[in-house]
Image (cartoon, grey):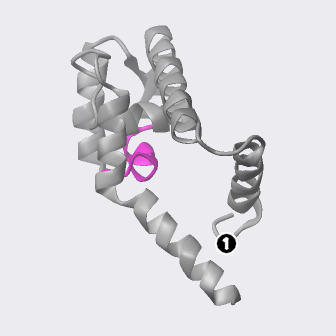
Amino acid sequence: MENDVGHEIADALGILLRRTTRTQLHSKLTEGMGEAVDELTYPVLSALARTGPRSAADLAPDAGVDRSGVTRRASRLEAAGLIRREADPDDRRAHLLVLTERGRSTVAELRERLAAHIMAGLSSWPPGEAETFARHLRRFTVEGPFA
């Protein structure tokens, strides 16, 4: 019985973590956000918002692309004024990617869109069930097998 629950959770996570699922979600969330903000640059913006200033190499694992992929996407975001490059105080040869004020505003808008999208998907759930799910999901991420 316990393994059945484990398999059910593993199957659900498999769907959530599929690249196509993420790409479709990122495409929907970035619709109309401007030319530089799309399903390719969304992971870089999101990762930078979570981690703070980072080099392209350090940001790559969090963004789910390699260093050169982060660099290409960062160039688009920089041209749009959403990020800037600053000298790394710990390594004069390296640069850190930093969200600008406009970049922070864009991330805030994307997070609002994501929250609204999630709530729309949960709108048919009985009262209290979404809150319970959120509490258990948070616990799973903090205390569970991926902690």
Residue 57 vertical position relative to residue 145 in the rendered view, above or below: above
Which image quarter is the C terminus in? bottom right
Q: Is residue 62 above or below residue 43?
A: below
Residue 89 showing in the rendered view = no
Report the side of 83 relative to 104 (left or right).
Answer: left
Residue shown at the point (43%, 43%) measured from the top left:
59
How many numbered marks are there? 1
Quadrant (top left, top right, bottom left, bottom right) of the N terminus: bottom right
- Judging by the rendered image, the residue that carries numbered circle 1 is 145
Q: Is residue 58 magenta?
A: yes
Residue at 75% x, 56% y: name it.
Answer: 136
| Residue 116 screen position, x and y as percent | 53, 28
Q: Position of residue 84 (x, y in %)?
A: 38, 18
Question: Is residue 130 on the magenta stretch?
Answer: no
Along the viewing direction, whichever of 25 and 78 lies nearer the viewer: 25
Instruction: Identify the secondary structure beneath mark 1.
Output: loop
Type of secondary structure dominating the magenta stretch: helix
Mark yes or no: residue 114 visible: yes
Q: Magenta segment range?
A: 54-65
Question: Which residue appears at 37% of the width and 51% of the height?
Answer: 64
Q: Nearer the viewer, residue 130 or 113?
A: 130
Q: Amino acid at mark 1?
A: Pro
Front residue of this view, candidates 93 and 102? 102
13 displayed left or right of 21: right
Query: Residue, x 49% and y 33% (percent of image)?
Result: 117
